[in-house]
Image (cartoon, grey):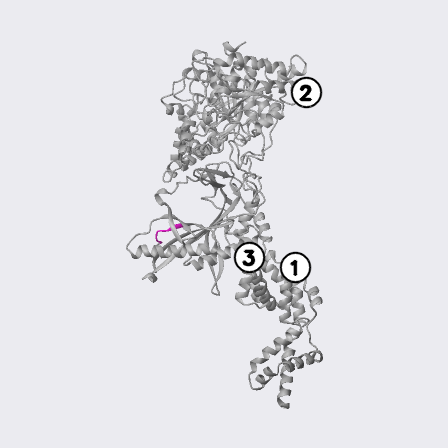
C-alpha cells in the first residue's frame, strides 16, 4: 500500500554569508562577540535610521547564481516582510519578494554514481534576525542583536526531490558550492547553513501536489533526512487511515526523531510584503556580472570531473576528495609532490581522514601538511621505507607534526640487504625448531609467525617482501637437507 | 532683531551691531514670554543654545564665522537630536533621547546654526492641525482659536511668531506647506531625495522630505543651501550637485511660464482665498511671467492614493515601536509578549496614529494589496505623468496651497476624512516627488493669511525660491507679523 505513494520535497536553505560587515550597516558579522557588541543605531532599528546595502552581499548572490546557472536579474528589489517578534527590531525583515536577484538554475548531484541535477526556483538576499536568550525560571528573555542584519541568501529549490537521500545529496552539493565560492562556511550545526523542508505525498503518477507540511529545526544533514523520512511516513499513514494532511509548520525533535505541529495555516502570518521604500532597486550591469564570472573559482562538479579524468580516480574517490574545497586543495598539493594520485587518494582517505575523524578534526586542522604527507609517500615509493614502516612514520607525523625525513633518520631506513638479513632469518628459524617442523609438515601459515619474529628483531625495518623470499629459500633448503 | 532675516542678521553680527548671544537671548525671551499661549515648543534647550551662542560670538570676533553662524533654529520633533529629547510628539517616546543626530542637524550645527529647541507636531507627523500631538495644542499666532495647521504646526507657529528666524519641518503630504500657508510664512518641500532623511523618524518613507520654514524665500534658500545634498547614510538621497540657491535668487522672471491647473482653480475655493491668489497672479504678470491654463486630470484621485501609500508605509515604519528597545514599555507583571505589545502600542499611540496604522495594515493585507496599495501606486505614476505633461507647457505650476484659511481648533475632530480632503493641492507634489513651496499672498477672513503654492520639476528648487523671492521684493505680505507677536 505504502508503495502507491511518492514524496514531493522542496528545500529552503538559508546560507549565512561570510561578508565582514552586515547587509545594511557597517557592523561586524564576527561570531562570538559579547551580546549586542556588534550593533549600531541602524541594526538596532532606532527611530530615523535607514539601511544602506552592502555591495558584497550582491556580489555573493550573483556569484552563487552564476555557479548554479540562474538568470541574474538586472534589476531586483528589496521588500519588507512584516511581523512582530523581539528579535526583529524593525518589526519587519528586509528580504526580497517579487523581484529576487536570481531566478532558476540547478544544483548538480551524484546519487549512487549517477549524475543528476535538481532545479532551483530562486535565490534572494535578506537579513538575519537576532537571538532570544530565555532566562530559565525567571520568566524573562534577553535579546542579542549581534546577528541582526547578518546577510543571508535564501536558496529555494523546486519541489523536485523525491526522497530524503535526494534531499541529502542536493544539500551536500549546494553546501559544497557555497563553500567553494567562499561565500558561506556551510556549518549546519552552528546555523550558518540552515534548511527548512516542504514535504508532501501523493499517489504515484499524480500530477497535482499534495498538501504540504513545512519542517523546521533541522540542524544537521542527518536530521534533515530523519525528519523527511519521518514526515513521509506520517503523511502516508494519515492518508492510509482515510485522513487528510493539513497544511502546517512542524518542528522536528531530534531526540524523538518525530515532527510535531508548531502552527497551522490559519495561524500563519500575513507578512504584508511590499517594496521597501528605503532602498533603491538593485541594478546589476553586464560589466559587474562579467568581472564576477571571471573571478569564479573551480566548482565542485568541475573539479570532480577533472579528478576522474586527469588523475584517473574512481567516481567514489573523486566524490570524497572534492567534498570540501580544502580537502581537494590538500589532495592536489600532495599530487604536485608525489606523482601517484591513486596512492595519495588512498592515503588521504583511509589514513588521514581516518585519523582526523577520530579526533573530530577538519582537514584544515590536520597536523600533517600536504607536503609532509607527499614526502613520506615519496620515501615509500622509492623503497626507503616499507609500507609497514610508512604507517609507523605516519602515526608519528600525526602525533608530532614532524616531517617524515627526521623520523626515518632516527628509526633507520628499510633493510633491503639480503646478506645482512640472512643471518637473522637463520637465527629465527634455529630458535623455533617446532614451528619449522610444522611448516615442513605443510602448515604454510606458520610463515607469518617467522615474518613477525624477524620484524620484531629488525624493529620493523626489514623489507617484508625480501624477508618472505629469504624465508622461503631457507626453509626450502632445510626441507631438502632433512 | 529676529524679524530681520538671516542675511541682515549676519551683517549685524559682522558689523558688531549685535551678537549671537544677544540674538539667542532675544529668541529665548520671546519664547519664554509668548510660548505659554502659543504652545510651539516641546523642549527648549536654553542652556545649550546660550553656550553655542557664545562660541558663535567668538567666531564672529575671530573672523571665522560659518554660513549660519549664530542663527537660532527650531526643529520639528520628528528629527533626531543627540543632545535633546526626540518624542515625535508621541507619548510612546516620552523622554526618548537618540544616541545620534540626524544628518540635517549635523549640517546645520556644522554651519554654525544654533538649535534652540524642538517644536510640536502631530504625533509622528500624522495630521493637518497639530491637534494630534500627544503633549499639547499649538495655536495659530494670528488667532489663538485656530490651528496653525500641521503636521509641522510648531515649526510654522514658532517662525510666524518670530520666535526664531527659521525652522525645519517635514512634509509627507503637505505638512510644511499647509502650516506655512495657515501661519503666513514660507515653507519649502524639496524634491524627494534632495535632503537626507537619515535621522528623520519615518512616517511614509517614499513621501517624507525635510524642508525649511522661514519668513522669506531668501531665508529658506539659506537653510536649504546647508541641508541639501547627498548622504551615504540615505540610499534615497541623491548626489545631484546642489546649486547656489542664493546666487540665483536675484535673476528676473521674464518669460517664466506659470501653469494654472483647472483642478486647482475650480470650485471649492474659499472666495477670499481665490481672490488673494488671483491677485498674486497679477503681480507675477507684472514681473514678466506668462500664465498658461492646463490640466492635471488625475488630481481627484490624489488624496485617496496618498492615504493608501502613506498609511501602508506607516503601518510598517511604526512597527518598531514595540516597547522592546526604547520608548515607554507597558506590561503587566507576568504578562505575555503579545500583551506587552498591545499595552505599549495601545497606551503609547494616539488615535490618529492607530487609525493610520490600521488603514495601512488593511491596504497591505493578503487579498487587498492589489485593490488598494498596488492601485494607489498606479495612480501615483499617473499623477507623475500629469506633471510631466504639464511641465512641457510651463516652468512651474501655481495654485492656492489650501482651499481655505486656517480652521478653528476642533473643527474636524469628529470628521478626519474631511480634514484629509483639504490636502488635495499639497499631496500631489509628494506623490510625484516634486519640489513645492507655499508663501503668503494675501489675507482672508478674520485677517488670516492665504498661501500660494508653486510646484516645479524635480530639482528645480532654485526656480521656486527665485520666483517667490522676486514676488516678495515686489510685495510685503511676508513682512506681516501677528499683532500679539509684533514686539
Across and down, in percent, residue B357 comes to 41, 31
Who is closer to the viewer here, B65 or B261?
Answer: B65
Q: Which residue is mark 1?
A: A401
Question: Which quadrant holds the C terminus of chain B?
Answer: top right
Is the Cβ of the residue at disc 2 closer than 8 Å to that at disc 3? no
Instruction: Judge if badges 3 and 1 mark residues of a common chain.
Output: yes
Q: Which residue is mark 3?
A: A360
Q: Is residue B252 magenta?
A: no
Q: Is residue B475 visible?
A: no
What is the quadrant of residue A161 in the picture?
Answer: bottom left
> What is the quadrant of the N terminus of chain B in the image?
top right
Q: Quadrant of residue B68?
A: top right
Picture quadrant where residue B265 is located: top left
2 vs 3, front mark: 3
Looking at the picture, how far across and down is residue A329, in whole percent?
61, 59
Q: How far is disc 2 from disc 3 in space, using C-alphas?
A: 68 Å
Q: Dot 2 corresponds to which residue?
A: B59
Q: In the rendered view, does A394 fall on the left or right side of A117?
A: right
Residues in magenta?
A: A209-214
Identify the chain of the residue marked 2, using the numbered disc in the image. B
- Is there a contact, CB below 8 Å, between mark 3 and mark 1? no
Earlier-in-chain disc, 3 versus 1: 3
- In this rendering, the label closer to the viewer, 1 or 2: 1
Looking at the picture, does residue B433 appear above or below residue A8? above
Mark 3 element type: loop
- For disc 1, the neighbor class at 10 Å (few under 14, some 14 to 19, many from 20) is some
Query: How far is the residue under mark 1 from the one under mark 2?
Result: 69 Å
Q: In the structure shown, which secondary structural element does the residue marked by tag 2 occupy? A: helix
Amino acid at each position: 500500500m505504502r508503495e502507491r505513494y511518492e514524496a514531493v520535497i522542496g528545500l529552503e536553505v538559508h546560507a549565512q554569508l561570510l561578508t565582514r560587515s552586515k547587509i545594511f550597516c557597517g557592523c561586524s558579522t564576527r561570531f562570538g562577540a559579547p551580546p549586542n557588541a556588534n550593533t549600531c543605531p541602524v541594526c538596532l532599528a532606532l527611530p530615523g535610521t535607514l539601511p544602506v546595502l552592502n555591495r558584497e552581499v550582491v556580489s555573493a548572490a550573483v556569484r552563487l547564481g552564476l555557479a548554479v546557472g540562474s538568470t541574474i536579474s538586472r534589476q531586483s528589489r528589496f521588500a519588507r516582510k512584516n511581523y512582530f517578534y523581539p528579535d526583529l527590531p524593525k518589526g519587519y525583515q528586509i528580504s526580497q519578494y517579487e523581484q529576487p536577484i536570481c531566478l532558476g538554475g540547478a544544483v548538480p548531484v551524484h546519487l549512487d554514481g549517477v549524475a543528476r541535477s535538481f532545479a532551483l526556483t530562486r535565490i534572494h538576499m535578506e537579513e538575519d534576525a537576532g537571538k532570544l536568550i530565555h532566562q530559565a525560571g525567571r520568566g524573562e528573555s534577553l535579546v542579542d542583536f549581534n546577528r541582526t542584519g547578518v546577510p543571508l541568501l535564501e536558496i529555494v529549490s523546486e519541489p523536485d526531490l523525491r526522497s530524503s537521500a535526494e534531499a541529502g545529496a542536493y544539500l551536500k552539493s549546494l553546501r559544497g558550492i557555497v563553500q567553494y565560492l567562499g561565500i558561506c562556511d556551510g556549518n549546519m550545526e552552528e546555523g550558518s547553513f540552515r534548511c527548512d523542508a516542504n514535504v508532501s505525498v501523493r499517489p504515484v503518477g499524480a500530477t497535482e501536489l499534495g498538501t504540504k507540511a513545512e519542517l523546521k529545526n533541522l540542524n544537521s544533514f542527518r536530521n534533515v533526512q530523519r525528519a523527511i523520512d519521518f514526515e513521509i511516513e506520517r503523511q502516508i499513514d494519515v492518508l492510509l487511515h482515510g485522513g487528510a494532511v493539513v497544511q502546517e509548520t512542524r518542528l522536528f525533535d531530534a531526540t524523538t526523531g518525530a515532527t510535531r505541529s508548531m502552527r497551522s495555516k490559519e495561524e500563519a502570518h500575513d507578512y504584508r510584503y511590499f517594496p521597501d521604500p528605503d532602498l533603491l532597486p538593485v541594478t546589476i550591469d553586464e560589466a559587474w556580472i562579467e568581472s564576477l564570472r571571471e573571478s569564479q573559482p573551480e566548482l565542485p562538479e568541475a573539479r570532480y570531473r577533472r579528478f576522474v579524468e586527469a588523475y584517473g580516480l574512481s567516481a567514489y574517490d573523486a566524490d570524497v576528495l572534492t567534498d570540501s574545497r580544502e580537502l581537494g586543495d590538500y589532495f592536489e598539493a600532495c599530487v604536485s609532490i608525489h606523482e601517484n594520485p591513486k596512492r595519495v587518494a588512498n592515503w588521504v582517505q583511509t589514513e588521514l581522514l581516518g585519523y582526523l575523524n577520530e579526533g573530530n578534526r577538519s582537514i584544515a586542522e590536520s597536523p600533517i601538511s600536504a607536503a609532509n604527507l607527499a614526502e613520506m609517500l615519496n620515501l615509500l615509493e622509492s623503497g626507503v621505507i616499507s609500507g609497514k614502516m610508512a604507517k609507523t612514520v605516519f602515526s608519528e607525523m600525526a602525533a608530532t607534526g614532524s616531517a617524515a625525513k627526521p623520523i626515518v633518520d632516527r628509526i633507520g631506513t628499510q633493510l633491503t640487504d639480503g646478506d645482512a638479513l640472512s643471518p637473522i632469518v637463520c637465527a629465527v628459524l634455529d630458535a623455533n625448531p617446532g614451528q619449522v617442523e610444522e611448516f615442513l609438515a605443510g602448515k604454510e601459515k606458520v610463515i607469518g609467525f617467522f615474518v613477525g619474529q624477524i620484524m620484531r628483531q629488525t624493529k620493523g625495518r626489514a623489507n617484508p617482501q625480501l624477508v618472505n623470499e629469504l624465508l622461503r629459500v631457507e626453509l626450502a633448503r632445510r626441507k631438502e637437507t632433512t | 532683531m529676529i524679524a530681520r532675516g538671516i542675511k541682515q542678521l549676519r551683517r549685524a553680527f559682522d558689523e558688531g551691531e549685535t551678537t549671537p548671544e544677544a540674538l539667542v537671548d532675544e529668541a529665548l525671551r520671546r519664547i519664554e514670554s509668548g510660548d505659554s499661549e502659543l504652545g510651539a515648543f516641546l523642549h527648549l534647550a536654553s542652556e545649550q543654545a546660550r553656550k553655542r551662542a557664545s562660541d558663535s560670538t567668538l567666531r564672529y570676533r575671530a573672523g571665522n564665522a560659518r554660513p549660519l553662524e549664530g542663527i537660532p533654529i527650531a526643529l520639528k520633533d520628528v528629527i533626531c537630536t543627540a543632545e535633546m529629547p526626540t518624542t515625535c510628539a508621541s507619548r510612546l517616546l516620552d523622554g526618548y533621547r537618540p544616541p545620534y543626530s540626524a544628518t540635517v542637524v549635523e549640517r546645520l550645527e556644522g554651519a554654525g546654526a544654533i538649535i534652540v529647541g524642538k517644536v510640536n507636531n502631530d504625533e509622528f507627523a500624522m495630521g493637518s492641525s497639530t491637534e494630534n500631538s500627544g503633549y499639547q495644542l499649538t495655536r495659530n499666532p494670528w488667532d489663538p482659536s485656530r490651528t496653525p495647521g500641521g503636521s509641522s504646526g510648531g515649526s510654522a507657529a514658532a517662525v510666524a511668531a518670530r520666535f526664531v528666524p527659521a525652522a525645519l519641518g517635514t512634509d509627507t503630504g503637505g505638512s510644511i506647506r499647509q502650516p506655512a500657508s495657515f501661519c503666513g510664512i514660507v515653507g519649502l518641500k524639496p524634491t524627494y531625495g534632495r535632503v537626507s532623511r537619515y535621522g528623520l523618524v519615518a512616517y511614509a518613507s517614499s513621501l517624507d522630505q525635510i524642508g525649511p520654514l522661514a519668513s522669506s524665500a531668501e531665508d529658506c534658500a539659506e537653510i536649504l543651501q546647508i541641508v541639501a545634498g547627498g548622504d551615504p547614510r540615505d540610499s534615497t538621497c541623491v548626489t545631484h550637485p546642489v546649486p547656489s540657491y542664493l546666487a540665483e535668487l536675484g535673476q528676473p522672471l521674464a518669460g517664466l511660464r506659470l501653469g494654472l491647473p483647472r483642478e486647482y482653480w475650480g470650485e471649492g475655493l474659499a472666495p477670499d482665498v481665490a481672490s488673494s491668489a488671483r491677485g498674486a497672479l497679477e503681480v507675477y504678470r507684472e514681473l514678466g511671467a506668462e500664465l498658461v491654463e492646463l490640466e492635471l486630470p488625475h488630481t481627484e484621485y490624489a488624496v485617496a492614493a496618498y492615504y493608501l501609500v502613506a498609511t501602508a508605509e506607516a503601518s510598517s515604519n511604526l512597527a518598531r515601536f514595540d516597547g522592546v528597545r526604547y520608548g515607554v514599555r507597558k506590561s503587566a507583571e507576568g504578562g505575555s509578549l503579545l500583551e506587552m505589545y498591545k499595552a505599549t502600542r495601545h497606551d503609547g499611540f494616539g488615535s490618529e496614529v492607530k487609525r493610520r496604522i490600521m488603514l495601512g495594515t488593511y491596504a497591505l493585507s493578503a487579498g487587498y494589496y492589489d485593490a488598494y496599495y498596488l492601485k494607489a501606486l498606479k495612480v501615483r505614476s499617473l499623477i507623475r505623468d500629469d506633471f510631466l505633461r504639464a511641465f512641457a507647457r510651463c516652468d512651474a505650476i501655481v495654485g492656492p496651497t489650501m482651499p481655505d484659511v486656517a480652521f478653528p481648533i476642533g473643527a474636524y475632530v469628529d470628521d478626519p476624512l474631511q480634514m484629509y480632503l483639504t490636502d488635495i493641492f499639497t499631496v500631489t507634489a509628494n506623490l510625484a516627488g516634486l519640489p513645492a513651496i507655499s508663501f503668503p499672498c494675501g489675507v482672508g477672513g478674520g485677517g488670516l493669511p492665504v498661501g500660494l503654492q508653486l510646484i516645479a520639476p524635480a530639482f528645480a528648487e532654485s526656480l521656486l525660491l527665485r520666483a517667490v523671492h522676486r514676488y516678495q521684493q515686489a510685495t510685503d505680505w511676508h513682512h506681516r507679523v501677528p499683532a500679539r507677536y509684533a514686539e
